[in-house]
Image (cartoon, rainbow, N blue to C red):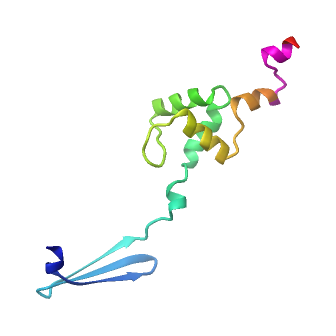
Amino acid sequence: MLGLLIEDVTLVKSERVSIHVRFQGGRTTSLEVDKPKPMALVRKTQPAVVSVIDELLETCTDQEVAMRLNELGHTNWQHQAFTTRKVALVRMTYRLPSRFERLRSRGLLTGSELAA
């Protein structure tokens, strides 16, 4: 039905996208919109969230970080709650050391290593 109302549409790409619509009766409408961001930028975790994850990893495991992020109201790029797996993926992507690696770098050992 919309095809019967619209004569043609012109798109002009520059810094922004200009859209010009000409209707059957001769009336025209124009508007400008921002170009869509590349998917790589859309899917990127916000720097503030990465910073919070790095800070929480000083005292929390991935599971505890996920619970804390959800309590603080943070979400991923799809506006979904954080899970242990999503926190681990962000940690690996941004090369953040895990809680275990941070403790190990301070010279701490596991119980079995200490017993040996």
User: Is residue 110 within the magenta segment?
Assistant: yes
Q: Please say if 93 is above or below 7.
A: above
Quadrant for the N terminus in the image: bottom left
User: Is residue 70 within the magenta segment?
Assistant: no
Q: Where is residue 57? Give x, y as percent.
A: 65, 32
Q: Where is residue 111? Give x, y as percent.
A: 79, 14
Q: Please say if 47 is above or below 19.
A: above
Quadrant for the C terminus in the image: top right
Label count reads 0
Q: Which residues are magenta?
A: 105-114
Which sits in the foreground, 64 or 16?
A: 64
Q: Please say if 39 is above or below 53.
A: below
Q: Where is residue 115? Give x, y as percent.
A: 85, 11
Which sits in the foreground, 1 or 13?
A: 1
The residue lying at 46 percent from left, 77 percent from top is: 15
Q: Where is residue 109? Give x, y as percent.
A: 82, 20
Residue 92 lies in quadrant: top right
Query: Seen from this angle, which residue lies furthest bottom?
Result: 26
User: Going by the image, does 13 lie left or right of 109?
Assistant: left
Query: Seen from this angle, which residue lies furthest top?
Result: 115
Which sits in the foreground, 108 or 4?
A: 4
User: Going by the image, does 74 lie left or right of 4?
Assistant: right
The residue lying at 51 percent from left, 28 percent from top is: 67
